[in-house]
Amino acid sequence: MRLIIVSGRSGSGKSTALHVLEDMGYYCIDNLPIGLLGPLTHEAIEEYRGEARASKIAVSIDARNMYRELGDFPLILKALRNSQIDTEVIYLDADDETLLKRFHATRRKHPLSDQSISLKEAIAMEKALLEPIASLAGLYIDTKDLSIYQLRDQVKLRILGQKGQDLALLIQSFGFKHGVPSDSDFVFDVRCLPNPYWDATLRGFRGTDKEVVEFLESHEEPQKMVEDIGQFLHTWLPHAQQNNRTYVTVSIGCTGGQHRSVYISEKLAEALKVKYKNVQVRHKELAE
């Protein structure tokens, strides 16, 4: 049986992620009390013999749980995994300012706010309350710059095809001038490579275009960079797996996220697909 636990602060997109999982065939439960995780999974295991849908369950857990139960989450998660239940934790979040804007736009009441607790205070309080879950998440998704449709695609991209303890890798390019993606597990800086941007005839192309590819492949440094990063990941990704990590995000950054990081990400993904079955590529700064 596979159990996916979706958590995150209010306004981060948990409901959207749960709906995606439901569309993918998961039996979904919103706002489940943490104390019911054990009984739920044990009941599902019993029913699994006669009901196929119980083999895939997704639950949403948020700060509406009792504080003591949130603190017990690490022990409950350990017990589930010791029971041979394939359990994954997905945590969605965005920065405080983004969450504030979303609440103001929808005019919804934050579940922790009241006459004595402001919205800003509630958002900060929620982050502290959910730390026991956030610290154990195998997959962290920063939804700050994602539309609902992009978030749906991200959830599908990361989970669809991820089976058991197979490692799901996301290689994403980005531009340092836009900030380092907060969902990164590994970050590599490729700004030291020859820059196609300074060639006026290449400036308008992307790192996937033939013209830029030929430019970068005419230099030795990009090939050596792919080789070195690939060797590093081949060495250390198995250690991540040994620590129950089934999702890893590798971020490759150049100045604007248009040329070098895009090229290196594509080449790195090709090299990693030799060993890993589930490797996806995302170019954060390229327009959809």
Image (cartoon, helix red, strand yellow):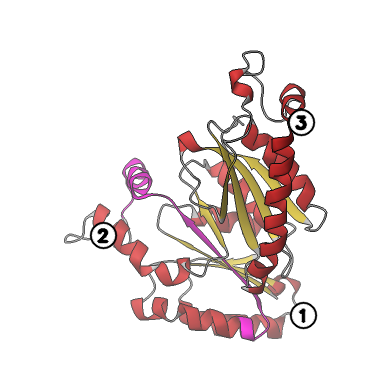
Tell me the residue that label 1 is attached to: 50
Disc tally is 3
Looking at the rendered structure, which numbered label has been put on residue 278? none
Q: Nearer the viewer, mark 3 or mark 2?
A: 3
Along the viewing direction, whichever of 228 and 213 lies nearer the viewer: 228
Q: Find disc 3 in the rendering and name its residue.
A: 217
Nearer to us in this view, 177 or 61:
177
**Circle 2 — which element?**
loop
Residue 206, how many percent across, how many down? Answer: 66, 26
What is the quadrant of the C terminus in the image? top right
User: On the picture, is 64 further left or further right than 144?
Assistant: left
- Is residue 238 left or right of 284 when viewed as pictured? right
Task: Judge the density around disc 1: few (<14), some (14-19), many (≥20) Cα neighbours within 10 Å.
Answer: few
Q: Circles 1 and 3: CB distance less than 8 Å?
A: no
**Residue 161 figure quarter:** bottom right
Looking at the image, tell me whether mark 1 or mark 3 is earlier in sequence order: 1
For the residue marked with disc 2, what is the amino acid? Ser
Name the quarter where the N terminus is drawn. bottom right
Residue found 39% across the figure and 73% down from its top: 65
Q: Is residue 101 magenta?
A: yes
Measure the alpha-carbon separation of dots 1 and 3: 56 Å
Relative placement, left or right, of 6 versus 107 is: right
Look at mark 2 in the image and give the residue it sits on.
Answer: 113
At mark 1, the secondary structure is loop
Give the CA separation, mark 1 to mark 2: 44 Å
**What's drawn in magenta, residue-wise?**
81-109
